[in-house]
Amino acid sequence: MTIKECYEVIGGDYEAVCQRMMRKEALVMKFTKKFLDDDSFKSLKDNLSAGNLEEAFRAAHTLKGVSQNLAFEALYKPSSDLAEILRAGSTEGAEELMEIITKEYEKTVAAISQL
């Protein structure tokens, strides 16, 4: 799988990330693969389960930022929505958003693993 095909599979914006990385596909590849080392999804899941909303917010905010920087649009949007809910100290709608985030995260990891 090429990096461009990977972005197509995960609903990412390949052109946007290329512009951010000065059209250097090697940089896009490097940072996309580094996403596999990011632990914000695990932290989000664990802290939500434990009821630690402050740390869950930090993790959601980090996941949102990483997803935005890499133009993983399908993961960015629900992560952003969840971060805003948690920022307000609420969990209303969090379960539904976590289902979407989990699906998109797993799809993203699976596609990146094929690079």
Image (cartoon, rainbow, N blue to C red):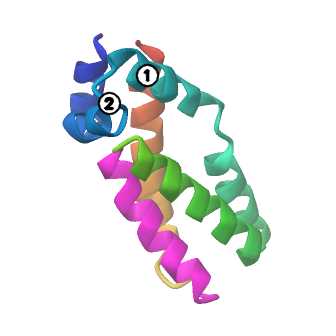
The reply to whether residue 103 is in sight is no
Segment colored magenta:
72-90
Q: Is residue 7 above or below residue 79?
A: above
Q: Is residue 19 visible?
A: yes
Give 94 or 18, whichever is nearer the viewer.
Answer: 18
Q: Is residue 103 above or below residue 3?
A: below
Q: Residue at x 65, y 71 (%)?
A: 57
Mark 1: amino acid: Leu
Residue type of the residue flagged with mark 2: Met
Q: Secondary structure at mark 1?
A: helix
Query: Viewed as shown, does residue 90 lie left or right of 74?
Result: right
Image quarter where the C terminus lies is: top left
Q: Secondary structure at mark 2?
A: loop
Looking at the image, which residue is at 65% across and 30% down?
Answer: 37
Quadrant location of residue 35? top right
Residue 107 image offset from top left, x and y in percent: 39, 35
Front residue (pair 93, 22): 22
Task: Nearest to the eye among marks 1 and 2: give it.
Answer: 2
Task: Work out how far the residue at label 1 is from the one at label 2, CA to CA, in angstroms.
Answer: 9 Å
Horizontal side of 114 relative to 83 (left or right) equals left
Q: Residue sitting at 71 percent across and 53 percent down?
A: 43
Left or right: 14 with respect to 113?
left
- 77 within the magenta span: yes
Q: What secondary structure characterizes most of the magenta part?
A: helix
Among the two numbered marks 1 and 2 on one chain, the one whose residue lies closer to the N terminus: 2
Tag 1 and tag 2, C-beta contact below 8 Å: yes
Task: Give the residue at mark 1.
Answer: 27
In the rendered image, which residue does mark 2 sit on? 22
Q: Residue at x 30, y 10 (%)?
A: 1
Question: Which mark identifies residue 44?
Answer: none
